[in-house]
Amino acid sequence: MKRIEKISVIITVVIVSGLLIFATTHASKDKLDKEYTSSYFPAAANFAGEATPLKVSDVKERLDRELIVNINLHASTILAIKRANRAFPVIEPILKKNGVPDDFKYLPVIESGLVNAVSGAGARGVWQFMPETAKERGMEVNDFVDERYSLEKSTQAACSYLLNAKAKFGTWTLAAASYNGGIAGVNKQIDIQKESNYYDLLLTEETSRYVFRILALKEIMKNPDKYGFSLAKEELYPLLPTRKIVVDSTILDLADFAKAQGINYKILKIHNPWLRDRKLENPTNKKYTIEIPLRGY
């Protein structure tokens, strides 16, 4: 009996200890969750200086959704922050030169993750231009050259589109929405619904989420420490210095060209992704600028 009583006491102690640990752990977790959920949502938000009406219930909920999604998409959000260190210094001055608000640098973050992505529909590059739209905006698209893959050229083309959309709709928020829904598509809904404010329009799910996704990434990337994305400077991807070569004739073999410049074919293509073939046909003697990295290869 004594042995049984001793075992019973031990079991009781273990169970009580376990319950205490469970309760303490969950109390701590509940406290952390409470602190987190009460502090992550911004007191105010705006896109390109245009206020987001967070007092409207569905507006607040839609931003909350995108914040929660992107806070928990750890890998893609971390990669976006790392890549932004390399891409934003190229994008920002082009936006500024064209009079396009700086907030638009977050648009390609949600479009492509700041890489030269290819969509199933045929959109390509960081800014995700379709072939015909790219040509309409002055970019060259063919078997040898595809300027949708040039960050500078595609950013300039995006500025052209956005300025046109702003002139049409009167607000940068609707201009951003039209980048996803199309100028004609957004304008049709404005006419049908008799509303001219993005936040008052019922649009397709993708376009309804679009500006909120930009707002969420803007909030997280401007305040990475607040959302648990603390990265040291050396962890960010650098913008490597390059020298520029202007060519105005056909290059028959880009691998030979790369070797002559002291690099290899892979590095040439990484720094000039708009070169789409193993050679550059140039029968019209058009001037192209090729970038050659000075280090980091």
Image (spheres, rainbow, N blue to C red):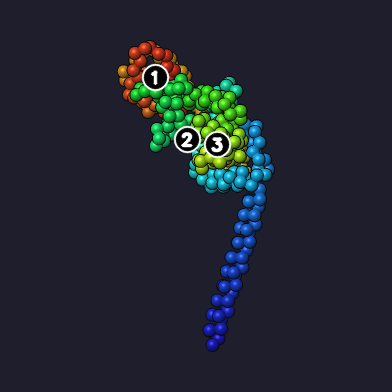
Q: Comparing marks 1 and 3, which lies closer to the viewer?
A: 3
User: Could you tell me residue 167's position as x and y percent?
Assistant: 58, 24
- Disc 2 crowd rating (10 Å Cα; few below 14, some 14-19, many 20+) is some
Whichever of labels 2 and 1 marks the residue nearer the N terminus, that label is: 2
Q: Residue at x 47, y 22 (%)?
A: 137
- Residue 110 horizontal side relative to residue 33, left or right: left
- Give the alpha-carbon distance from disc 2 to disc 1, as whole Å: 31 Å
Q: Residue at x 47, y 35 (%)?
A: 112
Q: Residue at x 61, y 43 (%)?
A: 59
Q: Secondary structure at mark 1?
A: loop
Residue 261: numbered disc: 1
Depth check: give the residue in front, 29 or 219: 219
User: Could you tell me residue 250's position as x and y percent?
Assistant: 34, 15
User: Could you tell me residue 82's position as x and y percent?
Assistant: 52, 36
Q: Amino acid at mark 1?
A: Gln
Residue furthest bottom as drawn: 1
Could one spot residue 294 in this view of the protein? Answer: no
Whichever of labels 2 and 3 marks the residue nearer the N terminus, that label is: 2
- Give the alpha-carbon distance from disc 2 to disc 3, as whole Å: 31 Å
- Give the alpha-carbon distance from disc 1 to disc 3, as whole Å: 58 Å
Q: Which residue is mark 3?
A: 192
Q: Which residue is mark 2?
A: 112
- Residue 174 horizontal side relative to residue 134, left or right: right
Location of the C terminus (image quadrant): top left
Q: Comparing marks 2 and 1, which lies closer to the viewer?
A: 2
Q: Is residue 105 above or below residue 282?
A: below
